[in-house]
């Protein structure tokens, strides 16, 4: 059965907005990280990795239990580089000991996206920390060296449609790949900390050359110094995905709307929130500047 959400007792919008603000202020303050990209993209990746372990066949993994806090999950080679996001969140967890790890990891991704001018992401609390025995085994996160069909099959495990898959991958407008983390490198310079539909525009507009990188892995590079993972490139090799790439390259609002829905589905997969009221929509720091 699905995990039943149990909100932290007596905590409401104001309490979670305080956590949001603490993360957002720390994001602004520590802007030099990773060549002045900042921690935003890394926090978004963490929120996806703690959720992407979900398996609808037995309702294992996923964001509910906050099991990333155990080495068994954190040390998954696919999570290399996310130690930065985890370290960033430690003082936040200390300041707000009442928030569960699952709620903190997902709220941090929502905060980072909104502070990077992304769409407003409705968020619901109620994830409850589980034990190390509940941590999913390594190997549930995707392999970047594969093609579009692999991506369709991989996300089929969570019940995502072609349209939801393309929208979700639009998050690769943020940050960059790091050779020492994943064996992929770049894009230098182009890496951004602003949420836009640029990933789709680049996919369609650049001429991509398949090259071996310094780690011996193949990736697509453009003469402007952009890069695409083989799984990214699969979105324009596969006709059914490509029509959504074209839609989002033309219409950023449609991308924002579809990304928001798919990202919420990713973060809430496997959890029954029916006992809770409506989701919270947080104000950005800019919207609160008194
Ligand atoms: C086919 C599925 C996916 C594959 C194979 C994939 C693979 C990767 C790889 C290899 C990196 C580079 C990591 C590093 O070297 O530091 C990366 C970074 C990133 N991914 Fe994905 N990813 C996928 C889906 C997603 C999704 C669904 C999201 C969010 C909704 C996401 C968000 C990010 C972000 C924000 C970064 C940049 C992190 C940073 O700059 O530190 N990815 N991804
Ligand atoms: C759209 C070009 N960029 C940086 C703005 C980009 N492209 C990517 N293909 C990419 C893939 C994984 C993680 C980050 C990524 N960033």
Image (cartoon, rainbow, N blue to C red):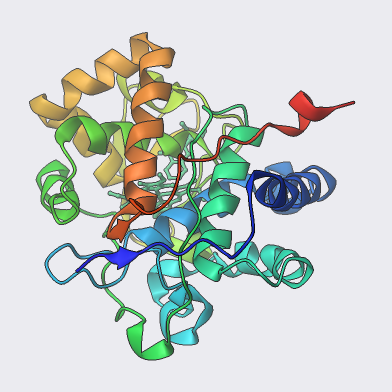
Q: Nearer the viewer, residue 97 or 174?
A: 97
Residue found at x 69% / y 47%: 20
Q: Nearer the viewer, residue 59 or 116?
A: 59
Does any portion of residue 183 appear in the rendered image?
Answer: no
* Quarter placement of the C terminus: top right
In this rendering, position of residue 36 left or right of residue 103:
right
Farthest residue toward the bottom?
133
| x then y, percent, for residue 264 | 38, 42
Above or below, 27 relative to 1: above
| x then y, percent, for residue 52 | 32, 59
Residue found at x 50% / y 35%: 121
Above or below, 34 relative to 206: below
Identify the image quadrant of residue 9: bottom right
Above or below, 269 relative to 259: below
In this rendering, position of residue 241 left or right of residue 24:
left
* Quarter placement of the N terminus: bottom left
Residue found at x 52% / y 45%: 176
Identify the image quadrant of residue 138: bottom left
| x then y, percent, for residue 208 | 31, 29
Q: Nearer the viewer, residue 24 or 8?
A: 8
Residue found at x 10% / y 51%: 153
In this figure, what is the number of numbered marks?
Answer: 0
């Amino acid at each position: 059965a699905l995990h039943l959400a149990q909100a932290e007792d007596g905590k409401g919008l104001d309490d979670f907005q305080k956590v949001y603000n603490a993360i957002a202020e720390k994001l602004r303050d520590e802007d030099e990280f990773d060549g002045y990209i900042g921690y935003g993209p890394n926090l978004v990746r963490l929120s996806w990795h703690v959720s992407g372990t979900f398996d609808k066949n037995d309702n294992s993994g996923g964001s509910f239990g906050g099991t990333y806090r155990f080495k068994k999950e954190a040390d998954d080679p696919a999570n290399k580089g996310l130690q930065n996001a985890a370290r960033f969140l430690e003082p936040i967890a200390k300041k707000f000991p009442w928030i569960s790890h699952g709620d903190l990891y997902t709220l941090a991704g929502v905060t980072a996206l909104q502070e990077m001018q992304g769409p407003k992401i409705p968020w619901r609390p109620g994830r409850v920390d589980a034990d190390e025995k509940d941590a999913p085994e390594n190997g549930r996160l995707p392999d970047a060296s594969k093609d579009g069909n692999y991506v369709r099959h991989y996300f089929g495990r969570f019940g995502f449609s072609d349209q939801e898959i393309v929208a979700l991958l639009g998050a690769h407008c943020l940050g960059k790949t790091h050779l020492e983390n994943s064996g992929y490198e770049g894009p230098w310079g182009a890496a951004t900390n602003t949420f836009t539909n640029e990933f789709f525009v680049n996919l369609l507009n650049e001429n991509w050359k398949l090259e071996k990188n310094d780690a011996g892995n193949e990736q697509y590079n453009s003469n402007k110094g952009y890069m695409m993972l083989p799984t990214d490139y699969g979105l324009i090799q596969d006709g059914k995905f490509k029509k959504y790439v074209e839609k989002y390259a033309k219409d950023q609002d449609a991308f924002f709307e579809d990304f928001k829905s798919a990202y919420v589905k990713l973060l809430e997969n496997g959890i029954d929130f029916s006992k809770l009221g409506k989701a919270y929509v947080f104000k950005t720091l800019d919207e609160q500047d008194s």
